[in-house]
């Protein structure tokens, strides 16, 4: 297994989408190859940063605005 | 069906599945639609915000998404509601970005073009220094996401903000699995390089 092949596998590895055999192979390569090891560490950090971002919500009058727009286009409401 | 089973306002709606609520929307029931908006408004707004990076535009797109969903409710059948509405929102975001392309200077965007930090990124309980660092970090991450081409940005947002699997991203984006993986992996390689200076 060469570094080029490992490259995509690192992504499936951080997404936990590898089977046990692939996992062993990746880990063996990582132990031997400092280039891919560094790449995996950086990728893991980037993924953690992305996963850590909080969900932010719309303003408090959002629901009212949506319902107004819906009722405006569909004034009959109940009879679609 | 479950209507009236539970006394008291929202309870009956809150107990229903998304798909059941859509069926009731299809009968023109605004209360069922209201429950769906409440359930999904944060997720849809956040998707739009991560895609276009401006609060006001994100709210407009989110509003447009729900309006579109209401108008297209007759065409909903069979799939998960979340996939369906994420797809509507994704398409509106990509359309919006395509239309406003000329105005976007994507490579050097400040973290928050309207000068506003996402309010709830800062944890008030954190020490001041820590809070600032956290907000700065969030701004840097948002900036890095914004610098991605929109098609790459979308798969990253769906994967990491919504925790969708590769297959669910295929459903939402109407892309084959190979394309989803290619875009996600390339996007994350770009982010890996951009973000590596940020964390010790
Ligand atoms: Zn290697």
Image: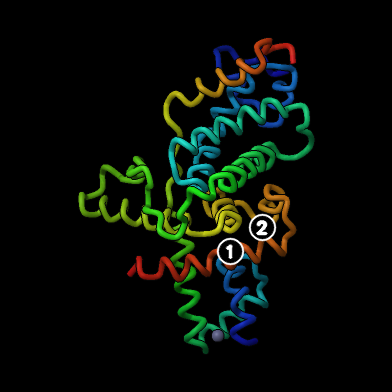
Q: Which residue is mark 1?
A: A15
Q: Residue A45: where, in percent of width, then height? A: 44, 66
Query: Could you tell me which quadrant the N terminus of chain B lies in?
Result: top right
Q: Quadrant of residue B61?
A: top right
Classify A34 as above or below A23.
Answer: below
Tell me which residue sits at (47%, 54%) in the image. Answer: B146
Query: Where's ligand 1: which quadrant?
Result: bottom right
State how far apart marks 1 and 2 are (Cα): 9 Å
Q: Can you name the residue that lies furthest to the left here?
A: B128
User: From where the camera sits, is residue B143 visible?
Assistant: yes
At which x and y percent is residue A59? 42, 30
> Is label 2 in a helix, a strand or a loop?
helix
Residue that mark 2 sits on: B166
Q: Position of residue B63 (x, y in %)?
A: 55, 30
Circles 1 and 2: CB distance less than 8 Å?
yes
Mark 2 residue crowding within 10 angstroms, few (<14) / some (14–19) / many (20+): many
Q: Is residue A51 visible?
A: no
At x 68%, y 36%, the residue is B81
Circle count: 2
Mark 1 C-beta to ligand 1 under 8 Å: no
Q: Which residue of the protein is positioned furthest toward the bottom in this rendering?
A: A32
Residue drawn at the location 58% of the way across and 12% of the way down? B7
């Amino acid at each position: 297994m060469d570094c080029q092949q490992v490259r995509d596998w690192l992504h499936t590895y951080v997404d936990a989408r590898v089977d046990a055999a692939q996992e062993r192979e990746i880990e063996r390569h990582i132990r031997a190859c400092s280039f891919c090891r560094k790449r995996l560490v950086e990728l893991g950090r980037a993924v953690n940063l992305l996963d850590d971002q909080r969900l932010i919500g719309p303003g408090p009058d959002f629901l009212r605005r949506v319902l107004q727009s819906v009722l405006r286009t569909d004034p009959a409401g109940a009879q679609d | 069906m479950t209507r009236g089973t539970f006394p008291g306002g929202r309870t009956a709606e809150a107990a229903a599945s998304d798909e059941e609520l859509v069926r009731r929307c299809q009968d023109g029931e605004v209360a069922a639609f209201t429950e769906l908006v409440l359930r999904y408004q944060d997720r849809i707004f956040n998707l739009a915000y991560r895609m276009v990076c401006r609060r006001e535009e994100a709210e407009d797109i989110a509003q447009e998404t729900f309006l579109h969903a209401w108008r297209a409710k007759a065409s909903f059948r069979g799939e998960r509601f979340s996939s369906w509405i994420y797809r509507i929102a994704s398409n509106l975001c990509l359309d919006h970005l395509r239309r406003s392309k000329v105005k976007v200077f994507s490579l050097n965007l400040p973290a928050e073009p309207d000068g506003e930090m996402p309010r709830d990124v800062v944890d008030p309980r954190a020490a001041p220094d820590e809070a600032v660092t956290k907000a700065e970090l969030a701004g840097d991450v948002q900036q890095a996401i914004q610098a991605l081409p929109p098609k790459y940005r979308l798969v990253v947002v769906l994967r990491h903000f919504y925790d969708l699997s590769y297959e669910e991203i295929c459903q939402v984006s109407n892309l084959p699995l190979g394309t989803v993986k290619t875009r996600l992996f390339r996007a994350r390689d770009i982010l890996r390089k951009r973000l590596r200076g940020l964390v010790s």
